[in-house]
Image: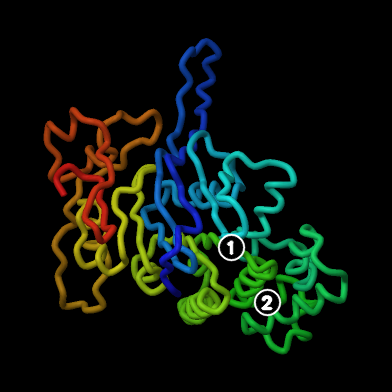
Amino acid sequence: MRNSKEGPLLRAEGLTKLFPVTTGNWFQRDPSFVHAVDGVQFDLGRGDSLGLVGESGCGKTTTGRLLVRLADPTDGHIIFDDGEGEPTDIATLSGKSLKGFRKKAQMIFQDPYESMNPRRTVLDTIAEPLKTQKIGGPLERLDSVSRILELVGLTPPRSFLFRHPHELSGGQRQRVAIARALVVEPKFVVADEPTSMLDVSVRTGVMRLMGDLAGRLGVSYLYITHDLAVARYMCDRIAVMYLGKIVEIGNTEDVLQNPRHPYTRALLSAVPVPDPSVVRPPVDIKSGVSVPIDPEARCRFFDRCPIADNFCRDNDHPPLEGDDSGHLAACYKA
């Protein structure tokens, strides 16, 4: 993977997604909303990888779906600049323009079996994006599918083309999912915990494959995971998310070696140590998870923060601030 001195491939600005909460009260005047993603902003460079980490329910997957327009944002902008024209706010795209964008942005889903049609062969599954984008004829598509299968390590391709998902192992299914995402040669890929459903024995192979393909094809990744070890292996930068907000972002080693936000420090202190003789101190965080329904304007982490004070309670959620290295934290006490 490489860093680029050019402008970012993708920039999220104030990205927000609210889900209405149904209460059953027809006379309620002010509806409630789940703030799944709330004012998120970050850049993703060309050929770079950004890891989005945090506990379940913090908004990671929703953010990924917004960035590839599998969900429509409530507010905010998603500026995409692939160098082939003027930068485009894909949050406003529809129709043919949105279909054209989908050729440049793909998603790898968490469960490779659930995301594949059990009635379709490997050939049909991988060729579907080519058909949708009207790329090539039947023979050209067969050739493209064969090449991408070989690229992802499913060789010889002819022995996999006409298999169905139930005839593949978990690692093979995930390689098919990766091939399906890359067959149209996208510039940007959202990988939603692509190794969490796999056995430990095959995870490293899939991660190594994705890193190799990113360098070879120049693909930019948003890598969604709850595993900090995976994020460290796969990503140039890390963004830590909590209740719809990014609370810390920076170069991977900077964030892991010098965490500034108390939530990041809590995540790191919870990582197991492979030594049974080591006694870890308790995680420095208050119990309970705040509810993301109509949250107060103050810091989202206030109710669980061990260092919060009255200033944190009485002021809005802190902005992301930091140094020239790009290591930013949303904390008044950082």
Residue 177 percent across, percent down from the top left: 64, 68
Asked whether 309 or 83 is in front, the reply is 83
* Separation (CA) of disc 2 from disc 1: 17 Å
Residue 69 percent across, percent down from the top left: 60, 47
Judge the density around disc 2: few (<14), some (14-19), many (≥20) Cα neighbours within 10 Å. Answer: some
Residue at the disc numbered 1: 108
In the rendered image of this protein, does residue 243 appear above or below residue 215?
A: above
Residue 253 percent across, percent down from the top left: 27, 69
What residue type is disc 1 on?
Answer: Ile
Under tag 2, what secondary structure?
A: loop
Picture quadrant where residue 250 is located: bottom left
Under tag 1, what secondary structure?
A: strand
What residue type is disc 2 on?
Answer: Leu
Q: How is the image coloured?
A: rainbow
Decide if residue 299 is on the left or right side of residue 96: left
Residue at x-position 27% and y-position 36% = 317
Picture quadrant where residue 326 is located: bottom left
In the rendered image of this protein, does residue 3 appear above or below residue 57?
A: below
Residue at the disc numbered 2: 168
Decide if residue 220 is on the left or right side of residue 133: left
Residue 156 percent across, percent down from the top left: 72, 89
Residue at x-position 50% and y-position 58% = 9
Asked whether 157 or 132 is in front, the reply is 132
Where does the N terminus fall, quadrant-wise?
bottom left
In the rendered image of this protein, does residue 61 appear above or below residue 119?
A: above
Residue reaching furthest right?
138
Q: Are marks 2 and 1 in contact (CB under 8 Å)?
A: no
Residue at x-position 54% and y-position 46% = 66
First along the sequence among labels 2 and 1? 1
Residue at x-position 41% and y-position 70% = 3
